[in-house]
């Protein structure tokens, strides 16, 4: 949660370099649950780029640069060498950025592979209260499937079955993720953001990230920081939602507290109140 907002506000910063695809999903595809970089998926992404460019009346040289990037992205084969090639247009004085939330779900072997990828690295991890995050994920996932209107008619058992079928709760296992990450990334190279701060004090969050990365301020014209992005559709969660995962929420939050993430402490009382 919050990564799209952050991406939108950092994308024009001259100290950062972003690939035409926001989410590359390389490490998840190699060290996660399934492959998000099949030949067909990459070809579809290239086709969508070409269709968008045609509608906008693409111009050279910007179009040619992106078209060449998509040729590399599509050709493969997917490997560490392939992944590195996706960033070869970045200058030496720029951060090469990959905004793939799915990276949080990779194994310890995956984090070891990330550690070998570059000598200097920074990680940004946005945390949202687990029950809020889970409900948002349910709405987003079922809308992505074209079934959002079905959600209002689903009972709690059906919703929980949907969560388990698509393993939606795992994205909120923040403590486990930070534990795996911390074995291969020094703590000072990780900034942990509270999603609530993005809502309540977005400009402060953006400044913290810029300071963390050691970059110049994002141009003022690209700082409409109070604008919410990629907001899921509105639907009240049903009574009892999250109760089946209360133990999981509590255990993961306790792990966060042991790792020093104090802004998560109030979350525990939310779960205790329903005991």
Image (cartoon, rainbow, N blue to C red):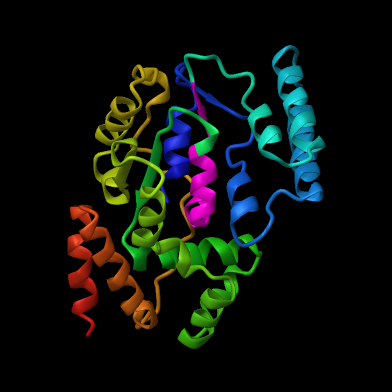
Name the residue rendered at 43%, 32% in the picture. Answer: 121
Query: What's drawn in magenta, residue-wise?
Result: 95-115
Does residue 161 sit above or below 80 in this rendering? Answer: below
On the image, the x and y values in percent for residue 197 come to 26, 45
Q: Nearer the viewer, residue 218 or 33?
A: 33
Quarter of the figure that contains the C terminus: bottom left
- The vertical placement of 171 against 268, above or below, is above
Q: Left or right: 2 with respect to 262?
A: right
> Horizontal placement of 109 versus 10: left or right?
right
Q: Residue at x 48, y 63 (%)?
A: 137
99 within the magenta span:
yes
* Percent position of residue 179, x then y: 36, 56
- Residue 117: horizontal and vertical position, in percent? 54, 34
Relative to 85, does residue 30 appear above or below in the rendering?
Answer: below
Q: Is residue 57 left or right of residue 30?
A: right
Side (left or right) of 59 relative to 214: right
In this view, 134 is above or below 106: below
Give the image quarter of residue 123. top left
Does the magenta portion include 70?
no
| Residue depicted at x 66% and y 60% | 34
Q: Does the magenta stretch mainly form a helix, a strand or a loop?
A: helix
State which quadrant residue 51 falls in.
top right
């Amino acid at each position: 949660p919050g990564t799209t907002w952050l991406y939108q506000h950092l994308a024009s910063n001259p100290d950062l370099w972003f690939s035409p695809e926001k989410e590359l999903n390389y490490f998840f595809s190699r060290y996660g649950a399934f492959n998000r970089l099949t030949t067909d998926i990459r070809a579809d992404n290239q086709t969508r780029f070409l269709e968008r460019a045609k509608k906008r009346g693409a111009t050279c040289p910007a179009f040619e640069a992106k078209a060449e990037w998509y040729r590399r992205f599509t050709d493969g084969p997917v490997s560490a060498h392939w992944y590195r090639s996706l960033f070869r247009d970045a200058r030496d004085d720029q951060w090469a950025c990959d905004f793939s939330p799915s990276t949080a779900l990779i194994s310890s072997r995956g984090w070891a592979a990330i550690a070998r990828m570059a000598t200097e690295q920074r990680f940004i991890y946005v945390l949202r209260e687990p029950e809020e995050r889970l409900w948002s994920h349910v709405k987003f996932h079922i809308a992505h499937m074209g079934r959002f209107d079905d959600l209002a008619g689903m009972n709690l058992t059906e919703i929980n079955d949907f969560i388990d079928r698509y393993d939606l709760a795992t994205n909120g296992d923040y403590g486990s993720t930070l534990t795996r990450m911390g074995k291969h990334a020094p703590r000072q190279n990780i900034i942990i953001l509270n999603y609530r701060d993005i809502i309540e004090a977005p400009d402060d969050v953006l400044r913290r990230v810029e300071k963390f990365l050691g970059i110049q301020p994002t141009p003022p014209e690209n700082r409409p920081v109070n604008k919410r992005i990629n907001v899921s559709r509105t639907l009240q969660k049903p009574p009892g939602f999250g109760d089946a995962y209360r133990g999981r929420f509590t255990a993961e939050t306790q792990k966060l507290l042991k790792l020093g993430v104090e802004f998560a402490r109030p979350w525990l009382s939310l779960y205790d109140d329903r005991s």
